[in-house]
Amino acid sequence: MREYESTDIRNVVLVSHGGAGKTSLAECMFYTAKATQRLGRVDEGSSLLDYADDEIERKITINLSVAHLDWRNTRINIIDTPGYADFYGDTKAGIRAADAALVLIRADAGVEVGTEKVWEFLDEHDLPRAIVVTRMDKEYADFDKTVGQARDLLGGPIVPVQIPVGSHDAFSGVVDLLTMKFYRYDRSGSGAGMMQEIPDDLRDRAKELREKLIESIAECDDTLLEAYLEGKEVKPEAIQAAYRDGIRGKKIIPVLCASSYFSIGTQQILDTIASAFPNPLEMPGVKGRKPGSDEVIEIKPNPNEPFAALVFKTISEPHVGDMSIFRVFRGSASEGTEVLNSTKNITEKFTQLYSLMGRERREVNKVITGDIGATVKLRDTATNDTLCDRADPVIIEPISFPKPVVHDAIRALAKGDEEKISSGLARLQQEDPTFTVVVDSETKQTIISGLGELHLDVVLKRLKDRFNVDVELTKPRIAYRETIRGRAEAQGKYKKQTGGRGQYGDVWLRIEPLERSKGFEFVDAIVGGVVPSKYIPAVEKGIVEAMDEGVLAGYKVVDIKATLYDGSYHEVDSSDMAFKIAASMAFKKAFLEAKPVLLEPIMNVTVTVPEEYLGDVMGDLSGKRGKIQGIDSKGHLQVVRAQVPLAELYKYSTTLRSMTQGRGMFESEFSHYEEVPREIAQRIIDEAKAAKEEAKK
């Protein structure tokens, strides 16, 4: 394998809405560059990049995948990412490891919701990019309409650098507006275009669009702009240099076109990447900090400084263990090097280093600044960990993964599988930071969370295939709370005589509400020792245990002040246990007389939708007992802020996607507890009592 310098490397991430053909285009690029001997097909299950069993079965990209090719003395690392929102964690990870992006848009569908979302992800990192209009061979393909949509919906300095020759069955190649040459392709899939003169019927249009392109390029360079405005001849080398600088400076977003199925246009795409996309040393430094400090520092891409890399993907492989895929942001590392995992302050060793070709690994001796490498058998390193030189420890800013929006309870179908399920879920969570597992201490349920129902389906399929356990999903129980709105007093008297020493405890309690979120306050107001001080802790303990058990429906009681103000005791028969029981009895009696109510968790919900769906979304939120807090504009999108009961949000992501044709997104986080409406509260109480009775049978 040829050795490259950092200046020869290009790291390119492919992003799009699902189904735009990212993986197919990547396969064409590998075949065109002769990195593979066979043109892989997603629909045939022969793709180099979509190699996992679940990807082959579903015919979609689920996992981030990395492969490389050599083109015009340039090493191009291709990062293929999922286009479906359920797997955006890997999309964001791929963007974090890249220096530029190809944004794919379908010529027969235009800009879709996923296109807008990945565009936002690229904007977060200010990444240079080019647009590739794909599926030019399909019916209803419309290049001009797609470019217009991109300008309207995505914004930015979008300018075509190619125009297609023909469309649908007649799509035969592209006209390069920089060179003013027509590259004609056959449909063999070879990816090799034959340079010809522009067809007569396209010459005038090509001249017109070239003029607009040159004007856009000239605006990136003052000297070039001056010459252009004065009508002077501008050398092609100057145009190419300004074009290159314009892309790298985000002043130009070029639009190319292609057919992934027939490999038409791939040669020009590879030329654009090699000649115009930035190398790692031309990128700004990444943010980071020194361990133990919150001060933000810049980690600049320098091959001569100490090693620093970020693990952006972890893959669990049978018989091998975890494989860590990392991007080197500074320095270099060789096989056998000991490095510091500065995130966890542990030492790791690179026993083997690899360059990736999808599923295949090719062993290398060294990884350099800007390159993407992989290693296995690291002891405790996970996604988002920094690996660096011990002499100069830094922690690279981690990837900001999307928060889970779908939550389900999980339970084993076979007794005895609980430990295997727990172990399997832990491994899957380590691989995928957007998948979380929590055991709810109140409801005693194991809650799994992800970015969508498809996401959880994939996780459970992997749990079955890799750990051989069957589970089922159920609706998570809501952790309601009980409290009071009034004040009440009650006596609890526990007296038991069994022939020998008896049991005796007698207390009088007064309970009253506290402000929300104040918890519990216990007051000892005993005068004259009517309840001896040694029994007071038992009284408090009895109250706390009764609060934990709940009174109305078995939910935890909160925000109550309890005052012990009277009682009596027996010299022989009184005990801690008797007073604890008496206190629990008094508390429950008083609670039922103090205007008890049920509280439910309220979530802060942020919904982002195109303006045309705003009315439907607001109406739906109101129907879910939501309270609209405000609406903000974000370009052509509307951001609705609302507070909605958690009980109303089960499977809301599916409802929202259906309501908005997949264009709506939402996030939620806990806000506070609020009183449940009486009719709903009674239903919850009745259901809880019925469940309790059923459990006794």
Image: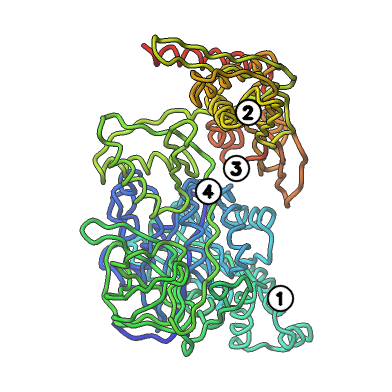
Image marks 2 and 1: residues in contact by CB distance under 8 Å: no
Position of residue 396 measured from the top left corner of the image (x, y, whole percent): 52, 71
Residue position for label 2: 600
Q: Would you place residue 437 above or below residue 443 in this image?
A: below
Q: Quadrant of residue 176?
A: bottom right
**How many angstroms separate mark 2 from mark 4 (CA)?**
47 Å
Q: Would you place residue 218 above or below residue 399 in this image?
A: below
Q: Earlier in the sequence, mark 4 or mark 1?
A: 4
Q: Identify the secondary structure beneath mark 4.
A: loop
Quick check: can you spot residue 483?
yes
Query: What residue do we see at 66% from left, 18% from top?
Result: 508
Split into 4 quadrants, where in the image is the N terminus? bottom left
Q: Earlier in the sequence, mark 4 or mark 3?
A: 4
Check disc 2 and give the amino acid type. Glu
Q: Earlier in the sequence, mark 2 or mark 4?
A: 4
**Closest to the observer, 330 or 619:** 330
**Callout 2 crowding tier (Cα within 10 Å): few <14, some 14–19, many ≥20:** many
Residue position for label 4: 108
**How many angstroms separate mark 3 from mark 2 (CA)?**
30 Å
Position of residue 102 measured from the top left corner of the image (x, y, whole percent): 51, 64
Between tags 3 and 2, which lies in front? 2
User: In the current view of this chain or complex, which residue is farthest to the left?
Assistant: 319
Between tags 2 and 4, which lies in front? 2
Labels in figure, total: 4
Residue position for label 3: 663
Image marks 2 and 4: residues in contact by CB distance under 8 Å: no
Image marks 4 and 1: residues in contact by CB distance under 8 Å: no
Q: Is residue 32 left or right of residue 652?
A: left
Residue position for label 1: 215
Check disc 4 and give the amino acid type. Asp
